[in-house]
Amino acid sequence: MAVPTTRTKEKAEIRINSDKCNGCGLCVDVCKDFSIRLEKGRVTLSNNPVFGCIGCGHCMAVCPEEAIQIYGRELSPADLFDLPAREQAAGFNQLMALFKRRRSIREFRDKEVEPGIVEKILEAAGTSPMGLPPSDVNVLVLANKKMVHTFAADFCTYLSGMKWFVSGWFLALMRPFWGKANNELFKGFVKPLFKVYTENMDAGINLVTYDAPVAMYFYGSPYADPADPVVAATTAMYAAESFGLGTCMIGGIHPLIQNGKRAHMLREKYNIKYTSREGLFVIMGYPAVKYRKGIKRTFASTAIMN
């Protein structure tokens, strides 16, 4: 049985040109589904694949003779491209400079982000690794300041009807079910978040999306690997930084629009197709402030075992 996603539930088709195959075995080495094997010096289909071809394309991409083609699961030979030369890739120091320059920006100049740059950021995000192909990541792009503000206002209206969710009686009721950590998180973060979002929006101040020129919401589907939307959002964030844009990840929206009739109505209005275990908003625009120093961050723990 093929691995199901929202985009396909069929396995891909592996086509082998035996006349081109030189028997090098590279494709067999990289196929972790064991869909192909070497037999008498030529590649052939295996009788014992794990899932059936998932359409990762590794065998097609590694073959020096172009003897393998994959069709299905949103993949075909037309999706192959020549890899950029290693000399074109950023080195570690360049990459670290990009990482270190990034800060969470919530103050933006009143300047639109050019559509071409938005397209390139999405193109970069599309290169993100995924749990299983084809990607089940979906992206909502709020492409101008007006749309970004409208979404935030609608979200705050939705929150105003959900205040029972952070009421004392509800938190006390849920405490035995969701445990100490969630209880502390709701009391110390989610409840104040409701208040600061709604009260400031009533005063004309957008502290949800900060009226950024662009916002992108990356979310999955019931089939998606939970990490995939977050990885794609992170790639988009660093791609935006490469264009001189400031970015900020907004984590307070996604969890609150997953359940209930009102959440469904909000998702439907903005063509958000699925509920998703994980999702992330990234706001971006030209920074209105310039930071002169960075701040070193650390992990909670690091265990290196040799």
Image: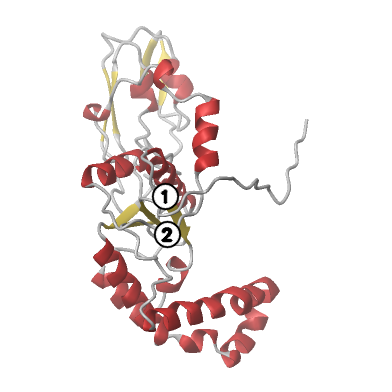
In the rendered image, the residue lying farthest to the bottom is 169
Frontmost residue, 137 versus 77: 137
- Work out how far the residue at label 1 is from the one at label 2, CA to CA, in angstroms: 9 Å
Left or right of 195, for residue 296: right
Label pair 1/2, CB-CB below 8 angstroms: yes
Residue 167 in picture, x, y percent from top left = 55, 89
Camera-nearest label, 1 or 2 = 2
Frontmost residue, 208 versus 140: 208
Residue 203 in picture, x, y percent from top left = 39, 82
Left or right of 215, for residue 50: right
Note whether 292 is above or below 162 in the view shown. Answer: above
Give the crowd class for mark 2: few <14, some 14-19, many >=20 residues within 10 Å: some
Give amino acid for label 2: Glu
Residue placed under numbered mark 1 in the picture:
246
Q: Quadrant of residue 157?
A: bottom left
Residue drawn at point x = 68 percent, y = 47 percent: 298
Q: Earlier in the sequence, mark 1 or mark 2?
A: 2
Q: Is residue 253 visible?
A: yes
Residue placed under numbered mark 2 in the picture:
107
Residue 204 in picture, x, y percent from top left = 35, 79
Note whether 265 is above or below 122 in the view shown. Answer: below
Q: Secondary structure at mark 2?
A: loop
Q: Quadrant of residue 143?
A: bottom left
